[in-house]
Image: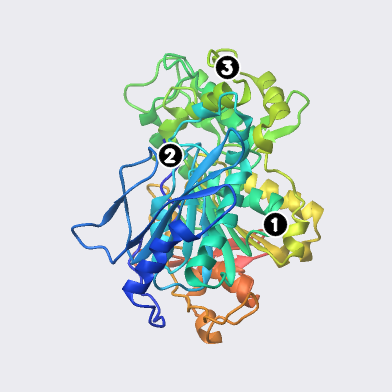
């Protein structure tokens, strides 16, 4: 099971003109030699294969692990499969894809949910953009964490070590193949990948120059607990509970949320720009009697009470804030069955059973706040990911670009605001702006899933999905070298592409204040760095204000 589709959609792109690479025969020989000539600590090169340009007959590859039988690839490349032993009882599998036409940059990609799946779609996308790209199975195979049972080292891999191994092994493979190290190193991930990105900055600040973190699963212990509590509000795992709300009802609940809150930003467009301003009152849907009307949609009192809990933050017994509320505007998400299908949230149940309690007989019948203290105490693999001290990453010149959809049905966007404020309390505002920026995206669901029903769907006008062709870095480049022509590096399309914006910030010091989303019909929408807000101006369209 996955939390979401891949962070980066595969798009048809216009690629830059690169210097002619060595002939295919030389590249093939260099690639095949990696298996016998490269020595990396605790790592075995399982296979090194040269893949020429794909044809219609052979567009896909056989994959590692159990997360799918085949994977696409779009450009000629050297594919390296490896296994690294991370301890006496744990290890991970990974793949490094080295494109013929390399832009001089290194890219690590993250994972999703609890899965142990190499994200082949991200490897394909990034190598098509000419990044040397690495991904791993995050320390286990498949979409279950049952292998973590009584194996805390596997939890360490999952929490942070796997991404560090990506950087260590991947950079050595890049240098061995291209005969020079990458000029710049990046990481991109969403959901679990966003948490991995945060852990990389906290625990291994020297691994990456630039980090792109989407919808990060930070404050993980509280997130995994909150997800379970959310399903308990509707009576899970009992779909006959009086509190249970059928999935078909959520579209109508979403219609009422929009009726109450859509126009608060000055325009009715199916998108709630500022969910924090939406004080949704589900009492408007209360049936006049205990029996729902046959002629008009309405909810029973237990169902309304469940909604009041869902749209309220989670507090502890002492009144302390534990986790933000469910995002208003996310009611029509295709991911809603994971939370509100009637079952207890499966990822929470698995995590508690096989990682926190190491008890295959554990059940969720008595699930409540007392469970959270135990989850916090165990904190498997130090996975919490909620420290505001990013000073080591800041001091080495790293840049961190975060984004979060404001209609996220899986991880509420309020957690990214809380994390921003936590960092702000550790660093001055000026220092914070110099290395960490957050973009909150109206209408965006989890990672890149659009909120259905919006008049211009596609993650509030396809946020960051207009790829920008970046020029390659010359062969004699080093970590301080220029990126080709200044005009090319700072092209006008950079503000339309979240990754290009990060590259421009890292390599040229151009910090992004606005990222422009573009709809299929060409309409655009400005997304502003937090705490600036996007406001509708009838004459100027969407503008950013303090």
Expressed as whole percent of the image width and height from the top left, the position of residue 243 reads 49, 19
Residue where numbered disc 1 is placed: 205
Q: Is residue 244 visible?
A: yes
| Residue in view at x 48 percent, y 79 percent | 471
- State which quarter of the image contains the C terminus: bottom right
Q: Earlier in the sequence, mark 3 or mark 1?
A: 1
| Residue in view at x 70 percent, y 43 percent | 386
Expressed as whole percent of the image width and height from the top left, the position of residue 535 reads 57, 62
Q: Secondary structure at mark 2?
A: loop
Give me the C-alpha separation between circle 3 and circle 2: 24 Å
Q: Secondary structure at mark 3?
A: loop
Give me the C-alpha separation between circle 3 and circle 1: 35 Å
Residue where numbered disc 3 is placed: 359
Q: Nearer the viewer, mark 1 or mark 2?
A: 1
Q: Earlier in the sequence, mark 3 or mark 2?
A: 2
Residue where numbered disc 2 is placed: 2
Callout 1: 10 Å neighbours few (<14), some, many (20+)?
many
Expressed as whole percent of the image width and height from the top left, the position of residue 225 reads 61, 28
Callout 2: 10 Å neighbours few (<14), some, many (20+)?
some
Q: Quadrant of residue 391?
A: bottom right
Q: Secondary structure at mark 1?
A: loop
Q: Using the image as rendered, state which of residue 208 and residue 432 is in the foreground.
A: 208
Q: Nearer the viewer, mark 3 or mark 2?
A: 3
- State which quarter of the image contains the N terminus: top left
């Amino acid at each position: 099971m996955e939390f979401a589709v891949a962070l980066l959609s595969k798009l048809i792109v216009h690629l830059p003109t690169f210097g002619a690479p060595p002939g295919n025969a030389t590249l093939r020989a260099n690639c095949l030699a990696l298996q016998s000539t490269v020595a990396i600590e605790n790592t075995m090169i399982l296979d090194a294969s040269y893949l020429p340009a794909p044809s219609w007959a052979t567009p896909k590859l056989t994959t590692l692990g159990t997360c799918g039988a085949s994977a696409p690839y779009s450009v000629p490349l050297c594919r390296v499969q490896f296994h690294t032993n991370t301890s006496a009882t744990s290890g991970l599998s990974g793949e490094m894809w080295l494109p013929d036409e390399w832009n001089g940059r290194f890219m690590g990609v993250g994972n999703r949910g609890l899965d142990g799946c190499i994200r082949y779609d991200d490897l394909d996308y990034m190598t098509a953009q000419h990044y040397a790209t690495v991904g791993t199975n995050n320390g286990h195979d498949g979409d279950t964490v049952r292998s973590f049972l009584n194996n805390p080292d596997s939890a360490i891999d999952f929490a942070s070590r796997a991404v560090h191994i990506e950087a260590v092994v991947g950079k050595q493979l890049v240098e061995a193949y291209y005969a020079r190290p990458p000029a710049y190193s990046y990481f991109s991930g969403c959901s679990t990948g966003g948490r991995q990105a945060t852990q990389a900055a906290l625990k291994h600040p020297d691994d990456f120059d630039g980090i792109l973190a989407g919808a990060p699963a930070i404050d993980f212990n509280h997130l995994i607990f909150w997800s379970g509590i959310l399903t308990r509000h509707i009576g899970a795992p009992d779909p006959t509970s009086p509190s249970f709300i059928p999935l078909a009802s959520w579209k109508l609940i979403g219609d009422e949320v929009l009726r109450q809150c859509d126009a608060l930003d000055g325009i009715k467009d199916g998108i709630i720009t500022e969910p924090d301003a939406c004080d949704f009152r589900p009492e408007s849907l209360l049936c006049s009697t205990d029996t729902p009307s046959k002629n008009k949609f309405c909810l029973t009192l237990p169902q309304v009470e469940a909604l009041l809990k869902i749209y309220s933050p989670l507090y502890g017994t002492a009144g302390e804030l534990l986790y933000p509320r469910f995002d208003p505007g996310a009611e029509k998400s295709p991911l809603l069955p994971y939370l509100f299908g009637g079952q207890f949230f499966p990822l929470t149940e698995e995590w508690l059973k096989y990682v926190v309690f190491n008890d295959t007989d554990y059940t969720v019948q008595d699930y409540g706040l007392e469970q959270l203290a135990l989850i916090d105490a165990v904190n498997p693999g130090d996975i919490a990911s909620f420290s505001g001290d990013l000073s080591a990453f800041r001091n080495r010149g790293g840049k961190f670009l975060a984004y979060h959809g404001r209609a996220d049905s899986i991880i509420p966007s309020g957690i990214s605001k809380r994390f921003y404020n936590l960092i702000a309390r550790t660093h001055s505002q000026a220092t914070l702006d110099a290395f960490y920026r957050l973009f909150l995206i109206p209408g965006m669901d989890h990672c890149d899933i659009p909120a259905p029903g919006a008049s211009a769907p596609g993650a509030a006008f396809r946020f960051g999905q207009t790829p920008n062709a970046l020029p390659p870095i010359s062969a004699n480049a080093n970590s301080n070298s220029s990126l080709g022509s200044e005009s090319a590096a700072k092209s006008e399309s950079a503000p339309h592409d979240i990754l290009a914006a990060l590259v421009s910030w890292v390599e040229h010091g151009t910090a992004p204040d606005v990222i422009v989303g573009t709809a299929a019909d060409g309409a655009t929408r400005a997304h502003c760095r937090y705490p600036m807000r996007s406001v509708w101006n009838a004459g100027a369209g969407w503008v950013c204000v303090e």
